[in-house]
Every structure is written in C-alpha cells, then in structure tokens.
Image (cartoon, rainbow, N blue to C red):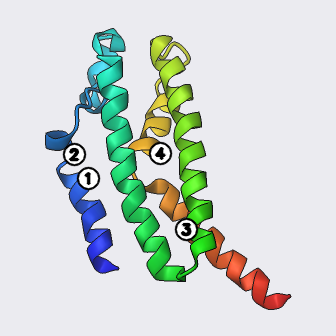
C-alpha cells in the first residue's frame, strides 16, 4: 500500500513534466495580470482526464487493499466517474466565463480533479460504512 501512496506522490511531483496545465501558473499569480483565454481547452481537459484517471486507478487500488471489498471498489469507481463529469463541467463553464465569479471556486474544483482528494473523503466514509454494518 505504501507503494501506491508513493505513486500518488510521484504523479504530483512530475505533473508539470507529464501534463499540460497552464492553470498551475495562472492560479499562482498570473490571474492578476491575464485572463485564461489563451488556454487550449481540449488539451487542458484531456490532460486533466489523464491525471484524474491515473489518480483514480491508484486510489481504487488503495481502497481495495484497505477494505478488500469489491462492492466498495465498484461504488468508488462510480463515485469517481460521476465526480469527474460534474466537476469538469462546472470547471469548463467557469473557464468559459473567464472566472468572472472569482478565482477560488475554479481553483478548488480544479484541485479536486487533479489531486486525489476524493480518496481522503472515501476512506473514512467507507470505514464508517463498515462500522455501521457491524452494529446491525
């Protein structure tokens, strides 16, 4: 399991070399000076999808190793799929709107897409499910 967490760290460490993501520098300080109009949308979303997919596969492996339950892995895979669709659509519409409603919401939505934060939500939720099943 430590190996899988190490893989998540490697994806994060080499993300700038592996993926097209002009939003990284944009959210660091460029939002003060330029608009996100120069972004190649299809390339950005394709790379966000690849990164999300890699993080998802590794996260599903962690969930399997922790709980060893196929139903948890299936639920998590569906949850990841739905989350990606919803978060990507919201991020896309905010990006098309040039973040006119502010920069924090798109920043955090993008963070949920490109980082394995959903794993941090699912692990305690699935553990809680096991506790509830034992009480019945």
Q: Residue at x 44, y 80 (%)?
A: 65
Mark 4 = which residue? 112
Compare marks 4 and 1 and give the one earlier in the sequence. 1
- Mark 3 secondary-structure assignment: helix
- For residue 47, what is the image quadrant? top left
Which residue is nearer to you in this view: 58 or 98?
58
For the residues labelled 2 and 4, the Cα–Cα distance comes to 15 Å
Left or right, residue 102 beside residue 62: right
Q: Residue furthest right?
A: 136
For the residues labelled 4 and 1, the Cα–Cα distance comes to 13 Å
For the residues labelled 4 and 3, the Cα–Cα distance comes to 19 Å
- Label pair 1/2, CB-CB below 8 angstroms: yes
Mark 1 = which residue? 12
Left or right, residue 113 beside residue 78: left
Which quadrant: the C terminus? bottom right
Compare marks 1 and 3 and give the one earlier in the sequence. 1
Q: Which of pointers 4 and 3 indicates the residue nearer the eye? A: 3
- Mark 4 secondary-structure assignment: helix
Q: What x and y, as percent, mark residue 71?
A: 63, 71
Compare marks 2 and 4 and give the one earlier in the sequence. 2
- Label pair 1/3, CB-CB below 8 angstroms: no
Left or right, residue 58 beside residue 88: left
- Mark 1 secondary-structure assignment: helix
Mark 2 = which residue? 15
Q: Is residue 74 visible?
A: yes
Tag on residue 72? Answer: none
Compare marks 4 and 3 and give the one earlier in the sequence. 3
Task: Please tell me whether residue 27 is drawn above or below residue 11 in the rendered image.
Answer: above
Q: What x and y, as percent, mark residue 95?
A: 45, 18
For the residues labelled 3 and 2, the Cα–Cα distance comes to 25 Å
Q: Residue at x 49, y 72 (%)?
A: 63
- Label pair 2/4, CB-CB below 8 angstroms: no
């Amino acid at each position: 399991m430590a190996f899988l967490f190490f893989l998540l760290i490697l994806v994060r460490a080499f993300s700038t070399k592996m993926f097209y993501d002009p939003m990284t520098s944009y959210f660091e300080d460029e939002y003060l000076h330029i608009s996100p109009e120069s972004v190649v949308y299809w390339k950005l979303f394709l790379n966000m999808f690849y990164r999300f997919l890699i993080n998802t596969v590794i996260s599903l492996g962690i969930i399997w190793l922790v709980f060893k339950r196929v139903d948890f892995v299936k639920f998590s895979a569906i949850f990841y799929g739905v989350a990606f669709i919803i978060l990507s659509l919201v991020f896309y519409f905010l990006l098309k709107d040039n973040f006119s409603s502010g920069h924090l919401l798109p920043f955090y939505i993008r963070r949920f897409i490109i980082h394995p934060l959903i794993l941090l939500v699912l692990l305690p939720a699935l553990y809680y499910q096991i506790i509830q099943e034992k009480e019945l």
